[in-house]
Every structure is written in C-alpha cells, then in structure tokens.
Image (tube, rainbow, N blue to C red):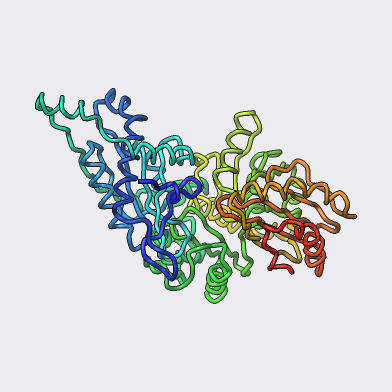
Amino acid sequence: MELKHLVSGTDIRGIVSDFEDRKANLSAEEIKFIVKGFEKWIKRKYERKADEENRKIKVSVGYDARNTGSEFSEIIKKELKQEGIDVYDCKMSITPSLFMTTVFEDYKADGAIMITASHLPSYYNGLKFFTSDGGFEKSDVLEMLEMGKRKKCQCEENLKKAMGIKDKKGKIIEKNLADNYARYLCDFIRKETGGEKEPLKGLRVVIDAGNGAAGFFADKVIKELGGDITGSQFLNPDGNFPNHVPNPEAKEAIDSVKNTVLNNNADFGIIFDADGDRSAFVDKDGREINRNSLIALLSDILLKENQGVTIVTDSVTSIGLKKFIENRGGKHHRFQRGYKNVINEAKKLNKRGIYTPLAIETSGHAAFIDNYFLDDGAYMAARLLIQLIKSKKKGTNFTDILSDLTEPLEEKEIRFPINSQDFRESGNKVLKALPEYVQKIAGWELEKPNYEGVRVNCEKDGWFLLRLSLHEPLLCLNIETGEKGKISDIEKKLYEFLKNYDEIDLSFIK
C-alpha cells in the first residue's frame, strides 16, 4: 500500500468521509497498515531498552473529538496489543498531553499516537506520532510507512511454531490522561504564583473549546484554581464542529470568544483548536491576542525573565514585532513557516549556545524550552494565566504592553496556483529571478538575512514575502504596509514581474 500522499509535514492527514468532490482516502484499512509500520519502527528503536528493563514496549493512544477518533483508536490498540505492545488507552485527550505520557512518571511511554487532524474540517482525520525525543520528523513518518510494507520473516515464524513459542500479547491499560494533564498544569500555575490553592479566585476566565478536545480546561484547570468560568462556550466535544471552525486563526472563531469576553465582563478569554496544541486569547478590553501580538506578549514575558534572549518565529511576522523585541533588548530570528521548522531552529540555536526559550509560528503553534519544546496551546495558556494572576496582585493589566506594538495598517495574503507538473522547479525559478527585479524598484530592499522565499522591505514600514507553499503547488504572497492604499501599489509592481511566467495564475490581481 502506498500512502505517501497522506503525509502532511510530520503528520498523516486524510479524508474519512466523502465530501462534495473529495473522496475518502483514510479508512480502517489504511490505519491498520500505518500501525503495522509504527509497530516495526517503535520496536526497532525501543525493543532492546524494554528487554533490558524486563518489560514490554509501552505506547499511549488518544484521540480528539472527531467522529472517527474512537473507531481508529480501537483499531490501533488492537493491532499494537496483538504485536506484544502494552497500550495506554488515553481516550479523548489533547495532542500535547500524548507527548507528556513519555514524561509522566505514571506512564513513561516509549511512544504515543494521537488521532487528530488539528483544525481541519470534520471530514478529515489523521495521526501524529511521538517518542520521548519529541514529535516525529517527516523522515520518520516516511520511514515508518516504508517499514509497513515489509512482511514478517517467515523463517522466524516457522522456527517459533516448531519450538512451540507463542507470541506474547500486550495488555491495554485504561488511563485518565485529561485529568492527569490538568493536574500537571494546575501544579505548574500554583507553583509559579506563590503556592495558593485557588490563585484564580476573583477572576473570570472564559474558555472556547470550539467543540474540540480541550473543553476540560474550563472545569479542571480554571475552576479548579478558583476561577469563574461563566460565559465559557462550546466545551462539549462534537466532531461536526457545529458552532465555528476549530481554528484560533479564523476570524469567526476569534470574534466568537471576543464577544463572549465582552458580554460576560470576563478578565480573559482563551480559545483552543480542536486538539489543543494551539490557542489564542482575548483580554478584558476585547483586544485580540494572536499572531504578532501573541508573540510580542510572550516575548516581553521572557525578556523580563532573561535579557537578550532570542525568539524564533516563522517568516511572516511583521516589522513592528521585530522592533518590539529589539527595543526590549531581545533578538528576533525570523525563520521559516512550519512549526517543526521553527522548533528545530530554536533547538539548533540553543546547541550553539544562543539561548532561545521560545519558538513560535503566527498560527499559534508555540513551543517553550522549559516545556520540552512541545507545541502546546494549554501550556501557553497556563503561562499567560500566571501573568494574569501576578498582574491582578499588582493592580495592573499585563496586556497593556501591547500598546507598544506597531501593527500594520493593511495586510493581505494571496495564493497563486502554479500550473506546472514540477511546481517546485517552476516556483523556485520565479524566486531566483525576483531579487534582480527588486533592485530596479525605488524604495524596495531585500531583507537580509532571510531564510524562506524572497522578503522585501518597502517604504514606510511596508514589506512583502513571496514563498513556495510547504505542501501545495502555490506561490504564497504576504503583504503588510504601514500606510493605507500601498498594498495595491506593491501588487501592481509585482504583477509586472510575475506576468512573464505563464505557469503562474495571476487571476487574483489582474
């Protein structure tokens, strides 16, 4: 079975039910094949260690609110058990908690499988994989799929049969991971705020779980810490996501939590994506804290803890954010799109002795050095709740610092289809030629250093970035300007360059 088409970055993503012109391509058959590959992969990595410790390999399995999550979980547990692996049945959980099963003393799993498709529509599902080293890299996923094609050695099977040796099956151990993970977050918040049992007492915090798996955060974290959760919404898991898309980047989602914060006079609002590895926030004044403002707020917190630190972000952050970080004595390392890219870059910088405590994408994926560089929306929420508690004690508002962040007056994203069999070759040809054109335009200057596509600074705090999509046949253009009416000027000048390439669909700006 060939399943490379289901690989999306470091995950497996597929369609589980026909939708309009999209046909289902991820069913029980594909799940079984993938698990067989994972079983071979995890045994090769951890079987010797497990034997030395006189135990079986341990793997945790959990799922988010999607309709096929429980079904896929049963298949995975059965296949792993059959192959002599002990399985922790974590039931409905959030993605970062699955990684933490490799850390928690009561688990110490060798690996973990999370059944999720993150923020994608309800007709999708997928798989994420972890070991104690972190999430799989794309190369690990591809290797695992290749291993799934290999059949067991028949001679070994014949020998076992002749000697009467029976394969020992694993066992399934039920765990309440959501409770365990909530307790971990509560302990962290209490410790960082002075040890009080109810540090959130007197504060109202609304949670919008988007009908995903993170609804537990309201009762088991906010309420447990003494907070008032009046106004919290969409806490019940529903794989059809009936109220809004489970994506904190989407306007309808952030508007929804913003309205409930204002309508309930809340002190803070938190919105999660479907599997809890991303989140965004709203302060008591209804100010949206996502994208650049979220990075700025977290950077300010970290720079107060350690001066001169480096913050790694993706490539589409604003000029205003860079100035915000540098004005506070920090260093902004603008890298590439893709949460694994920013995380791996932060790890590399730390190995070189450059202290980099945060890797974060504008999408809301954030990973802290003191949380195993795990992209974890719940841990990030805990970090901000700590600041909320501390600022209450001081009689201040910790989000006021965002008034120092210069936001763009205009912004736009355009995705140009590339009509070519080898879209990467065609796209790279465009990107290679663009710098020469830039040098001919008055007021345009190439950004250096730059790690993705071609980024150009334009007059009056304007910029654009043209890059290849990570996975699709698209050229992606992001534009921001500090002056209204300037985006159309940039578009027109870029059109004069791009019209020379027939394979680029320019219908968006003609």
Tell which of 73 and 302 is nearer to you. 73
Rendering coords of residue 180 (x, y %): 35, 48
Return the residue found at the far bottom. 263
Image coordinates of residue 305 in percent, x first then y, are 64, 42
**Along the line of sight, the residue nearer the viewer: 157 or 418:** 418
The residue sitting at 22% across, 41% down in the picture is 81
Name which residue lies at 66% across and 39% down: 306
Residue at 65%, 60% (x, y): give it: 416
Judge whether residue 185 can be spotted in this image: no
For the question of whether residue 232 can be seen, the reply is yes
Quarter of image, res 68: bottom left
- Image quarter for residue 92? bottom left
Q: Position of residue 248 (x, y in %)?
A: 54, 62
Residue drawn at x 52%, y 49% as measured from the top left: 193
**Viewer-proximal residue, 242 or 370?**
242
Nearest the eye: 184 or 15: 15
Vertical relation: 47 (above or below) 62: above
